[in-house]
Amino acid sequence: MNNFRFHAYTDIYFGKGQIINLPDILKQFGKRVLLVYGGGSIKKNGIYDKIYELLQDFEITELSGVEPNPRITTVRKGVELCKEKQIDVVLPVGGGSTIDCSKVIAGGAYYEGDPWDLVLDPKKIKKVLPIVTILTLAATGSEMNKNAVISNMDTNEKFGTSSHDFIPQASILDPEYLYTLPAIQTAAGTADIMSHVFENYFKTMTSAFIPDRFAEGILEACIKYCKVALEKPDDYEARANLMWASSMALNGLVGAGNGAAWTCHPIEHELSAYYDVTHGVGLAILTPRWMRYILSEDTVDRFVMYAENVWHLKPQEDKFLMANQAIDLTEKFFKECGIPMTLTEIGIDDSKFDIMAEKAVRYGGLERAYVPLDVQDVKEILRMCL
Ligand code: NZQ
Ligand code: ZN
């Protein structure tokens, strides 16, 4: 195993009714709270009213309307509010978009220039307001990690930025909050969790027994419980397992010791930058095609391990047959979860493949990926997705 640093300090309040602790969590940081949320799901499912009931002693300022694939324009509004109202703590309530937007707002509150600078250059993030999250979608792991992904639709750019200080101080994870998710968000969120694992599991380092078993456990949980949650949206065990899988897949546990660049994520970020697609849908479409493209004599043993330990396929003499069966099962799983599995189905043709492939390689560092890819490789993978 390679050297690594693992420091996941988010205080997790997991389970039914944990929101009751919100006042005590927030009061460590101050009274002036910026409540950040998206298009209104938290009003429909009652979380919004509960927050107001609990926070009667606090001064709440609101920023609503955070978009899926959050925009820098919304971050700028939030930064202005923080400065004007002298906010003490930022409280995102929602999915990854709301949390990511809040992280850059929290950094922007202490920055004099345009917050887009903090997306382009994480070294400019010097100080960050405390962040406490209430998660309503199992997907990104943002509730327990240092990353934020922000879009600039004027320039067709979607970039990740990162700071240790972006890690939330505390996160409330109540699986019951997932009951109201639209089926496609449950499925896309699961595809995202699985992709976070795949990006780390498929690696050249072979001596990582513990991270590999963590990874396989998370993948199995996703495969088992996504279908249950889709059939019965209020199945607590299913939601609880998906919610914890979200946090565990991208808090450093699975990636510990793996230095390679990711592959499907940088390519998906280009799809979102140009077509505003749902992150997990883009990943589900790309993943099996990427797997088929990189399957070779050098990688087949990892795919056999995946086939045996995640899909429980019986060992066979023909390693490639086994690897292909596991990839087919991956694609079938996403399809059965109701995810559209071609770019054509989500309205994307090949007209921007050149620019998207070029940017994915340039910004994603794909020459350092598990299997290094150049622009032609990425274009071929995109063509396989049509
Ligand atoms: O806006 P509202 O009305 O809340 O509706 C949201 C939104 O439309 C809805 N939703 C969320 N919880 C709900 C609910 N609807 C009903 N009931 C609930 N309980 O779901 C829709 C999607 O929400 P969003 O936050 O966009 O989804 P997700 O959590 O998948 O976040 C996606 C964003 O995170 C980035 C993605 O690129 C994308 O921008 N990522 C962030 C990462 C990180 N911070 O580490 C890593 C990821 O790889 C990813 O790139
Ligand atoms: Zn992701």
Image: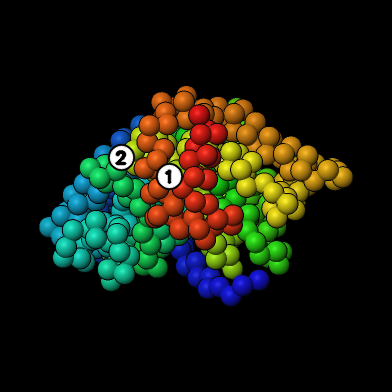
Tell whether circle 2 marks a residue whose Cβ is less than 8 angstroms from ligand 1.
yes
What is the three-letter code of the residue carrying label 2?
Glu
Question: Which numbered disc covers residue 357?
Answer: 1
Count of labels in the image: 2
Location of residue 120 with respect to 47 vertically, above or below: below
Residue 258: x %, y % from top left: 58, 65
Location of residue 232 with respect to 303 vertically, above or below: above
Tell which residue pokes out farthest to the bottom in this image: 3
Q: CA distance from mark 1 to mark 2?
A: 25 Å
Residue 73: in sight, yes or no? yes
Instruction: Identify the residue at horizontal 22%, vertical 58% (top origin).
Output: 115
What is the three-letter code of the residue carrying label 1?
Ala
Nearest the camera: 302 or 218? Answer: 302
Residue 175: in sight, yes or no? no
Asked where in the image residue 233 lies, by quadrant, the reply is top right
Q: Which mark is nearer the camera, 1 or 2?
A: 1
Residue under label 2: 67
The quarter in which the N terminus is drawn is bottom right
SS class, disc 2: loop
Tell which residue pokes out farthest to the left in this image: 84
